[in-house]
Amino acid sequence: MSFATFFLGIVIASIIGCAFHFWHGGGFKWLIFFNLLSWIGFWAGHFLGIIFNFRFIPLGPINLGPALIGSVVVLFLGFWLSMFNQGPKHK
């Protein structure tokens, strides 16, 4: 995988992470968090698509379909887990 392919994947995943941040809102730390989750999910989906030979919307060497699905799934899962509170709220 070339640097240009890696850079394109990071740009696409960042667009998804920024769109999720635009939809949900939050401060700068949430923007960084959502972009990191999107990058992780994007590349995990890409490589899982390669491992299981699932080619869907190929974009050059990037397996875009599974990558987009992985990015969105990891974003929602990470957001849901970040809202988990371990103890009862006391006011």
Image (cartoon, rainbow, N blue to C red):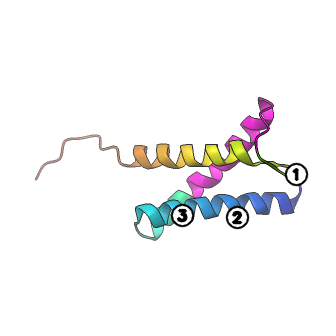
Kindly identify the residue that appears in the image at 61 percent across and 48 percent down.
Answer: 71
Query: Circle 1 is placed at which residue position?
Result: 1
User: Outermost residue toward the front?
Assistant: 57
Residue sitting nearer the eye, 54 or 1: 54
Category of crowding for the residue at label 3, using alpha-carbon neighbours closer than 10 angstroms: few (below 14), some (14–19), many (at least 20): some
Residue sitting nearer the eye, 71 or 27: 71
Which mark is on residue 19? 3
- Please name the amino acid that badge 2 sits on: Val
- Please name the amino acid that badge 1 sits on: Met
User: Is the residue under label 2 in contact with that under label 1 (CB below 8 Å)?
Assistant: no
User: Outermost residue toward the left?
Assistant: 91
User: Is the residue under label 2 in contact with that under label 3 (CB below 8 Å)?
Assistant: no
Label 1's element? loop
The tag earlier along the polypeptide, 1 or 2, is: 1
Closer to viewer: mark 1 or mark 2? 2
Which mark is on residue 35? none
Q: Position of residue 55 (x, y in %)?
A: 79, 38
Q: CA distance from mark 1 to mark 2?
A: 15 Å
Q: Is residue 61 left or right of residue 19?
A: right
The tag earlier along the polypeptide, 1 or 3, is: 1
Query: Circle 2 is placed at which residue position?
Result: 11
- Please name the amino acid that badge 3 sits on: Ala
Q: Where 19 falls versus 59 (above or below)?
A: below
Label 3's element? helix
Q: Where on the picture, by quarter, is residue 23?
A: bottom left
Q: Where 50 falls versus 76 (above or below)?
A: above
Q: Position of residue 53 (x, y in %)?
A: 81, 31
Residue sitting nearer the eye, 63 or 84: 63
